[in-house]
Amino acid sequence: MDNHDRKLTDILTSAKTVASVGLSSNPEKESYKVAEYLIGQGYKVIPVNPTATEILGEKVYPSLSAIPEKVDVVQVFRKPEDVPPVAEEAIKIGAKVVWMQEGIVNYEAAQKAEEAGLQVVMDACMRAAHKRLNIGPKPGMS
C-alpha cells in the first residue's frame, strides 16, 4: 500500500462525521449517490446546502459554521474556484480533513488547509476510494 492509499485508509477508518458541502437534493446527482453510499457504510453525513432543508433524511445546514457538532471530514462538491472559502471555514470549525471530490482541484485552498494542520485529499471520490480500499462498513453497521 503506497502512502497515498495509507492516508486515505487512515481518513476513511477514523472519520465518523462527514459534512458534505454542495450536496444536492437531486437523487440523480453524483453528490447525492456518494452521500447515500457513505450513510449506508455507517458515516454520519451532514448536508451543507443553503437552498435545502432536508436531504437523505438529514437536517441541512446553510454553512459549515452552522453545524452544531464536530466534523471530521469536509467533503466538497463545489467548483474548484469555490473551494477556498470552504477550506477556510473547515479550518475555523476544527475539521481534520478537506476532501475535494473527483474533478475538484484547488492548490491554494489545499495549501491553506495543510498549513493549518488539516489533511487534504484532492480529485478523489470518497465512495470510490472506500470501495477500492475495501474499508467495509463502520462497526455496528450490518
Image: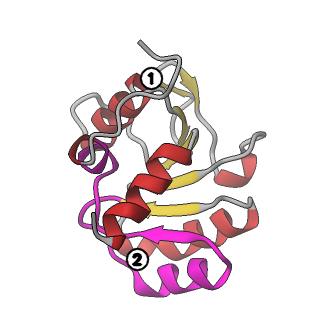
- What's drawn in magenta, residue-wise? 101-130
Q: Residue at x 51, y 80 (%)?
A: 109
Q: Residue at x 53, y 76 (%)?
A: 84
* Depth check, front residue: 128 or 89: 128
Kind of element beneath mark 1? loop
Residues marked 1 and 2 touching at CB (< 8 Å): no
Kind of element beneath mark 2? helix
Q: Is residue 5 above or below residue 11?
A: below
Q: Is residue 107 left or right of residue 65?
A: left
**Circle 2 is placed at which residue position?**
81
Q: Earlier in the sequence, mark 1 or mark 2?
A: 1
**Circle 1 is placed at which residue position?**
56
Q: Quadrant of the C terminus?
A: top left
Q: Tell me, yes or no, if residue 49 can be seen here.
A: no
Q: Residue at x 24, y 41 (%)?
A: 131
Three-letter code, disc 2? Glu
Q: Residue furthest right?
A: 68
Q: Is residue 63 left or right of residue 126?
A: right
- Crowd around label 2: few <14 · some 14–19 · many ≥20 (10 Å): few
- Crowd around label 1: few <14 · some 14–19 · many ≥20 (10 Å): some
116 within the magenta span: yes
* Residue 74 picture location, percent across and down: 54, 55
Q: Residue furthest top?
A: 142
